[in-house]
Amino acid sequence: MTTLFDPTTAGALRLNNRIVMAPLTRNRAPGAIPTPLMATYYRQRASAGLLITEATAISHQGQGYADVPGIWSDEQVAGWRQVTDAVHAAGGRIVVQLWHVGRVSHTSLQPDGQKPVAPSAITAKTKTFILTDGVGAFVDTSEPRALALDELPGIVQDYRHAARNAMAAGFDGVEVHGANGYLLDQFLKTGSNHRTDAFGGSIENRARLLLEVMRAITAEIGGEHTGLRLSPVTPANDVIDANPQALFEYVLRELAPLNLAFLHLIEGATGGPREIADRPFDYAALQQAYRTAGGQAAWMANNGYDKALANQALTQGVDLVAFGRPFIANPDLVQRLRADAPLNAADRTTFYGGGEKGYTDYPALAA
Ligand code: 8OZ
């Protein structure tokens, strides 16, 4: 029987096991440039079969929180190079999560203090985190402006450029952040997309930006180096779709020919309940739609998994399981799961921002 500890492949990626470190926002990149401390943090966790970095902005416009990293400049690429070298030296694999926040931002984080951008000028009822004179605070997101039709090719180009930078920085590939109410998810879903042009209205139109982004990235770096994260029913960041089952089955059928490395599904509410009473979703039917269309990507499941639930999922069509919060406090999570050892508890007060405390100082099991 296959277990979490058996090696596998995902596109071009050869993984030592099926345990994935989920993307985790940690806000420790001042000026959006990855630091040596971040290299230590990721190296400590390199026994995961695959590391997915924290969400990383593809452009200044794509920034939505203080001190999150970017991957649009050469200086950022050089910063990430320290991270990928450290992880590879420790025998791990790492992809960078490519992120445009869309409307989940604040004017103070945007170029020249401009409004954040979105499919439609609808403010998200959610908070972001900003720094004012070095003091952090959670604040309401700013009112966005709707992107003009002629701006969308530039957004696609920013993703493509970020993917090229990712390979230059030594990553094994990228994960496109299509989840959690950020730009691509805002375009997908009826609640946030009220456009009347070719990028709004029908499912085909709402899916168009995501599909153009995925086609551009796979043309640039190859599908075998490309993954995608989706969250069909999460309420995170105030998104909702009227008919998510039909929407996501369409998206996955269209993605089938792209030869993707993996598809990463957040089941239920991100970081919350796996089942949402008024938002049912059939993930097995989604996978069936993708496989029937010829899609071969590894299927990565996420949200609230423990060892028993993960091993059960491996018998039901899941190939990889992503663990989030357990990796914050347990750099050697793979070893601990293998040994059924107790897990360190994570300190919430150090999740976002700060230095080594609550970041690189969690102990591994004694040798
Ligand atoms: C927590 C805090 C800020 C951002 C996501 C990138 O939910 C995030 C995020 C999580 O995908």
Image (cartoon, grey):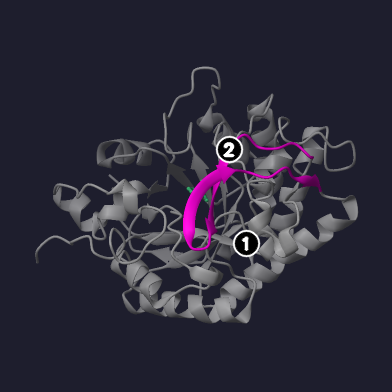
- Amino acid at pointer 2: Thr
Q: Is residue 219 visible?
A: no
Disc on res. 126: 2
Is residue 153 magenta-colored? no
Asked whether 283 or 97 is in front, the reply is: 97
- Amino acid at pointer 1: Gly
From the viewer's perspective, tell me whether residue 348 is left or right of residue 54: left
Instruction: Please provide percent x and percent y for residue 16.
Output: 33, 63
Q: Is residue 139 visible?
A: yes
Instruction: Please provide percent x and percent y for residue 293.
Output: 66, 42
Mark 1 lies on a secondary structure that is: helix
| 15 w.r.t. 292: above or below | below
Asked whether 184 or 2 is in front, the reply is: 184
From the viewer's perspective, tell me whether residue 319 is left or right of residue 103: left
| 83 w.r.t. 153: above or below | below
Is residue 136 magenta-colored? yes
Q: Which residues are magenta?
A: 121-146
Mark 2 lies on a secondary structure that is: loop
Q: Which residue is mark 1?
A: 223
Q: Are marks 2 and 1 in contact (CB under 8 Å)?
A: no
